[in-house]
Image: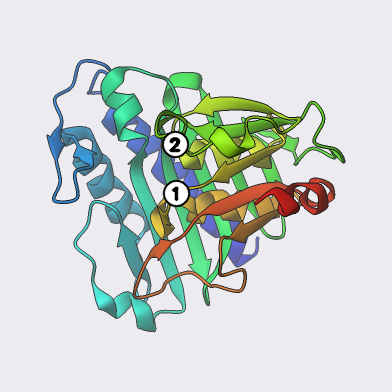
Amino acid sequence: MDRLEKDLMRIEQALAEAARSVSAFTPGRIAAEKKAGGDPVTAADLAVDSVLKEMLLGPGEGWLSEETVDNPDRLDKERVWIVDPIDGTREFVEGIPEWCISVGLVVYGRPVAGGILNPAASQLFLGTAEGGVTLNGTSARVTEKTTLAGARVLASRSEIRKGLWKPLESAPFEIIPCGSIAYKLAQVAAGLADATISLAPKNEWDVAAGAALVAAGGGRTEIKNAPQRTFNRPNTLMDGFTACGQTLWNVLNPLL
């Protein structure tokens, strides 16, 4: 068993334990507080963060999580875990089954392994750069869609509400509202949707695991205005993020 396979086992075990931790809380019936930037946080976010850190972080590795105070020591590490304990906290609070637990492993700035678990939908997405993607243990990959006609494109509910998708409403693809960006990326990686586009800024913890999964599934990801950007940066924010199959990229890219 090579190192990435062992890493993926660690991810799967950590996600299983995180699922047990989050099961103590009821989506739709949990109080939320607002962080300094206005985003919600719950006791479930913090509980899952603690579980993931305990199970994943090894000697000499770095850690970046939405719910952990950032330690700049991670910038000097070869291997860095980038996690979002609950991506889609708003959906979790509202009881919408479009939230997930997201774990990504970055090596020298490149996402190489990822695991995304949506407990509400009983979906576990796992993948590595070398081993491909599985959904609930079955091999999967991105779609081979070549045209925009009839393509299923996942879009942020909040971005739709803010009107950011208005310029794309006349495009020939179907715009499907969905919550968590990590969950959207996982669906693209496993061929459950053809593409996802984030028009608003995202943080590394939002997309690291999903980026690893899309690449493992044979797809393509692109960071808006910074296509060569690596992960584990001092500034974790990126302008936007797109993911789709390789064959769809050439027709989707001109619209962005």
Contact flag, marks 1 and 2 (Cβ < 8 Å): yes
Q: Which residue is mark 2?
A: 159
| Residue 229 seen in render | yes
Q: Nearer the viewer, residue 121 or 23?
A: 121
Q: Residue 105 in the image: x percent, y percent?
A: 49, 61
Q: Point out residue 107 in the picture as x, y percentages from the top left corner.
A: 53, 72
Which residue corresponds to the image point at 33% horizontal and 65% vertical from the top-left? 63
For disc 1, the neighbor class at 10 Å (few under 14, some 14 to 19, many from 20) is some
Left-right relation of 14 to 214: left
Q: Position of residue 68 (x, y in %)?
A: 22, 57
Q: Where residue 104 sits: x, y (%)?
A: 48, 55
Q: Residue at x 62, y 68 (%)?
A: 227
In screen coordinates, is 238 left or right of 62? Answer: right
Question: Which residue shows up at 46% across the image and 79% down it?
Answer: 78
| Kind of residue sitting beneath label 1 | Ala
Image position of 252 (left or right of 32): right
Q: Which mark is residue 200?
A: 1
